[in-house]
Amino acid sequence: MPCEISQNALRKTAQRLAKFRGTRCERMRNALRNFGGRFAQVDAYFGSAAVLILIWLLVGFPLTVIGGIFGKNMADSFDAPCRTKNIPREIPPVPWYRSAPAHMLIGGFLPFSAISVELYYIFATMWGREQYTLYGILFIVFVILLSVTGCISVALTYFQLSSEDYRWWWRSIFSAG
């Protein structure tokens, strides 16, 4: 009979519909899993990432909004601790070694000198001459680089502020960045 549906056609239709069943997260995870072996680890960490995003969306974001509303409504009017003027102060001239290019040169040279020996080993590995195996030492050198860069930035910003230059914001970043 032409109007009768065979069992085989029903089974195939049910299998096709089962592919599209599920939530968006399941479909996205399955698509990434089936994409290839390069994304094999995605499946292991997908649930953890989804939980962290949900925690932020359901806890962190609402608390941030509620805290902003409370802070805005409960804050007193701003009372400056000192009297301010509309006319900016005149910045006194500085010697050449306190200029912005000199600070940038010093702020770049000192962190570079802290890691220059380690760069030899990294470049030798990149050019294929040696095998790099000192990853723990590399992490320690990275921490040293961060601490030297931070200390140099603080020191150069202090030198700029002590010479009564109040425009320190961007220069503090560029001096050791």
Image (tube, grey):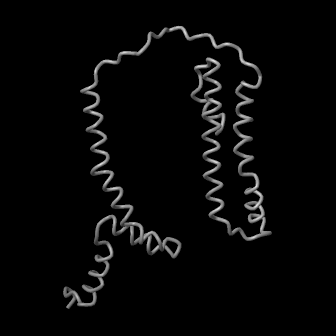
Left or right of residue 59, residue 146 in this image = right
> Which quarter of the figure has residue 177?
top right
Residue 119 is left or right of residue 168, and the answer is: right
Give the image location of residue 28, x and y in percent.
38, 66
Q: Where is residue 37 in the image (x, y as percent from the top left)?
A: 51, 76
Q: Above or below — where is 118 with respect to 69?
A: below
Q: In which quarter of the image is residue 147?
A: top right
**Front-lying residue, 95 or 130:** 95
Q: Where is residue 58 in the image (x, y as percent from the top left)?
A: 27, 51
| Residue at (75% x, 52% y) in the render | 116
Among the 4 quarters of the image, the one containing residue 67: top left
Name the image quarter holding the N terminus. bottom left
Q: Which of 40 and 169 is in front in this view?
A: 169
In the depicted structure, whether residue 45 falls above or below residue 150: below
Is 92 displayed left or right of 124 in the figure?
Answer: left
Tell me what residue is drawn at x 39 percent, y 69 percent: 29
- Residue 12: x and y in percent read 30, 84
Q: Which residue is rendered at x = 69% and y = 44% of the image?
A: 111
What residue sits 61% from the left and 47% below the top?
146
In the picture, measured across the screen, residue 42 lies left or right of residue 94, that is: left
